[in-house]
Image (spheres, rainbow, N blue to C red):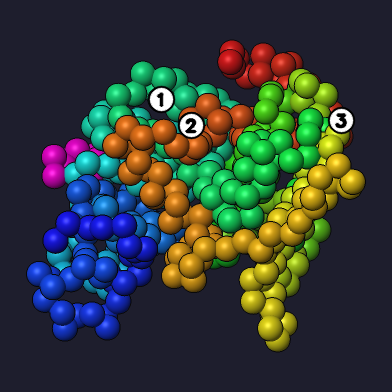
Amino acid sequence: MNPGKELRTRDLSHSTRFDYIPETDRYLAIKEKPQYKFNVIGAGMVGQEHISVTHLEGRGTIYGIYDPNAGSIDAARDIHAQWSDDPLHIYESLEAACNDPEVDGLIICTPNYTHLDVVKVAAKSGKHILLEKPIATTVEDAYEITKIAESYSGVLQVGLQYRYKSIYVEAIHEALERDAVGDIKLISMQEHRIPFLDKVNQWNKFAKFSGDTLVEKCCHYFDLMNLFAQTRPTRVFASGSMAVNFTQFEYEGEKSDILDNAFVVVDYENGSRASLSLCMFSPMFYEDLVVCGDAGRLHAREQSDFLIGGDLQSYVEIMTGEDKPSRRIQTGYPSWIENSGHNGATYYEHVYFIDNIEGKTTSTASAVEGLWSVIVAAAGQESIRQGQAVDINTYLNEHNIAI
């Protein structure tokens, strides 16, 4: 049966309520046949999310995984089995996983510090690549990946998927497409959340493996700040510390050394200015964005807490005074998308990854944008170490980076 214009949802095609209906009789609940096969490199918590979302999106399927941790393999098998009766191929080496001719693309979810080495192997395959954030832990490694991406024949998409949280989709549309607040002058972001979760080998508790907190966690926010500023940063000043989290934590005789709070201020070429407030010892998840222009103010908010009736709350508010209507927009995706990972952002990251493969125009993060998010983060961490502002041009020259 040829599809018509009726409202459709992939949720129906995955619902067990329609298992009794023969495939030939499905119309609204038709199961789309996957067109692409992907291998997941690194099957920890994030890799498992990508496995589930790949199946949920429907145009692709997970063919196999590579991960040296047996527990990750077992968990990946269980998740895959919830979606597919096909076997999940387990590879004995990174090279085998990257070069299997059955596979169209690679989803790289390995620890941050491995990204450059993994991309070097993956890129030799010529397959499409979705590389989890941050693009790398250092500006040098990130720059090297951008050089690989410049001449890469396939898609190389960086997983800065916060662009696709509903509040930020609407904020980007209002501020950058509708020009709702006019010429943007000030950008403010805030995140308050619980500490970093456990990882295999606890690599995210050590700056040399994660890149430290501003790189590991806040690259998302610096990417958004760069998007709203619409130009390059010129100076970064930051203050931060390790105040509460993991101050007594040791792993294999080494003490944790990651930031758990920071203030970061970024100046941009066009005179706009941005700030980030981060707290990693808060008993909730709270994100807040304020964009102020010469014609109004935009406020985007997302909160998830432990209070009765405290389900995720998100909205975008535009205040424009007397010149034009002000409004508050309740944002969100269908619950089955919101619950699939990062409030639906991972789902749309996958939608646009396949759109990129099919040659469609999307707003996914390029390798260069991934690099700039790390430049701001790394400069912020350098500013904390030095106790003074970091000039971006000087910083890039010191690291032999010309962009």
**From which residue to which does the magenta span run?**
95-102
- Residue holding disc 2: 366
User: What's the residue at 27%, 53% (across, down)?
Assistant: 59
Query: Measured along the vertical axis of the image, is residue 97 above or below residue 50?
Result: above
User: What's the residue at 48%, 67% (across, down)?
Assistant: 334
Asked if labels 2 and 1 touch by Cβ distance under 8 angstroms, the answer is yes
Kind of residue at disc 1: Ala
Quadrant of the rendered structure where residue 284 is? bottom right
Distance from disc 3 to disc 2, alpha carbons, whole Å, reads 30 Å
> Please, which residue is most extreme toward the bottom here?
308
Q: In this rendered view, identify the residue nearer to me: 295 or 246.
A: 295
> How far across and how far down the image is residue 147, in percent?
44, 20
Q: In this rendered view, identify the residue nearer to me: 8 or 66.
A: 8
Left or right: 308 in relation to 363: right
Distance from disc 1 to disc 3, alpha carbons, whole Å, reads 33 Å
Distance from disc 1 to disc 2, alpha carbons, whole Å, reads 9 Å
Is the C terminus in the top left, top right, bottom left or bottom right quadrant? top right
- Residue holding disc 3: 388
Does the magenta segment cover residue 277?
A: no
From this viewpoint, is residue 71 visible?
Answer: no
